[in-house]
Amino acid sequence: MHAEITQIVNETPSTQTFFFDLYLGHVPGQYVMVWIRGVDEIPMSLSYSNAITVQKVGDATAALFKLGKGDSFGIRGPFGNGFSLEGKSILLIAGGVGAAPLGSLAEKAKGNNIRVKTILGAKSAEELLFKKRFDNAGDLMIATEDGSLGYPGLATELVDELDLAKYDAIYSCGPEKMMFRVLNIAEGFDVLSRVQFSLQRYVKCGLGLCGMCCIDPSGLRVCRDGPVFRGDQLVGTEFGQYTRDASGKRVKL
């Protein structure tokens, strides 16, 4: 499909939201394949039904940042499974641009009268993504690595202070090291099946055909079986240990 950019919002110094002229029925956590013509096609989580939120980290995203209102890109999807909204009291754990798919989940939960508590982490106060969205949806705890706002340290250090058994479901998206720590904490509370993680892997086809995003040793495909997995699906896998680059070579986390 052809998506024309209708608005660009500067969310943080390194992150922008690109609104486009298509409204995609999606479950929070699902992703689309975004084709930046002449550069690359990359997977991006939907942050709204008509937007993606992007951090400039490589050639494709750098090219996307050069586009303006009225420019366009190609789009396929939504693909994969999203977060399954469960229970009456939930915890969201977001790190950096990982807040992108969780913002719409928080708003959907609030609309379903579910109590929402969010731990939002970033390197600094100015890099906190969707702070207002999470604040409007429920209780918000903030952690910044430089101590410029909220707790001075890592988001997972705030998770350590909570009783995870009190929550019906827990959702996490962000750096894999952060999520791996959440997995370990959840294992200590014996609530692995209640935690849903959104994984990022090199996704090429988005259709489950090429196998580029398979997880060792289960062979689960991030593009079709994920990108959201429960904690008990990830124990004993490559999760938290390594990922793979475009050539298939292992890259240690």
Image: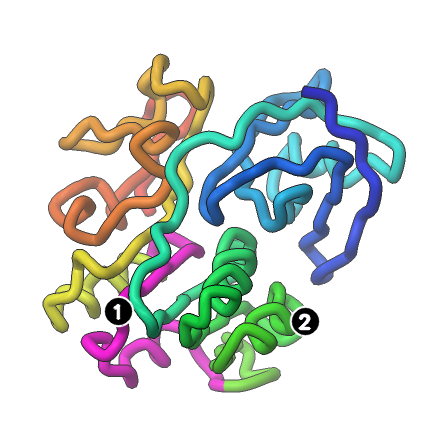
Q: Is residue 113 left or right of residue 243?
A: right
Residue 91 image point, x, y percent: 36, 71
| Residue 68 located left or right of residue 233 | right
Residue 159 lies in the magenta-colored region = yes
Q: Please tell me whether residue 165 belongs to the stretch shown in magenta.
A: yes
* Colouring method of the image: rainbow
Q: Which residue is mark 2?
A: 126
The residue drawn where x is 35% and y is 19% is 208
Identify the secondary structure beneath mark 1: loop
| Amino acid type indicated by mark 1 | Asp
Q: Amino acid at mark 2?
A: Glu
The residue segment tinted magenta is 151-177
Which of the two discs, 2 and 1, labels the residue nearer the N terminus? Answer: 2
**Depth order, front residue of 182/72:** 72
Which residue extends farthest front? 112
Percent x, y of residue 35: 65, 23
Q: Is residue 41 above or below residue 11?
A: above
> Which mark is on residue 168?
1
Q: Are discs 2 and 1 less than 8 Å apart at CB?
A: no
SS for callout 2: helix
Q: Residues within 10 Å of mark 1 (few under 14, many from 20)?
A: some
Q: Which mark is residue 71?
A: none
* Vertical side of 187 occupied by 40: above or below: above
Residue 154 in sight from this viewpoint: no
The number of numbered badges drawn on the structure is 2
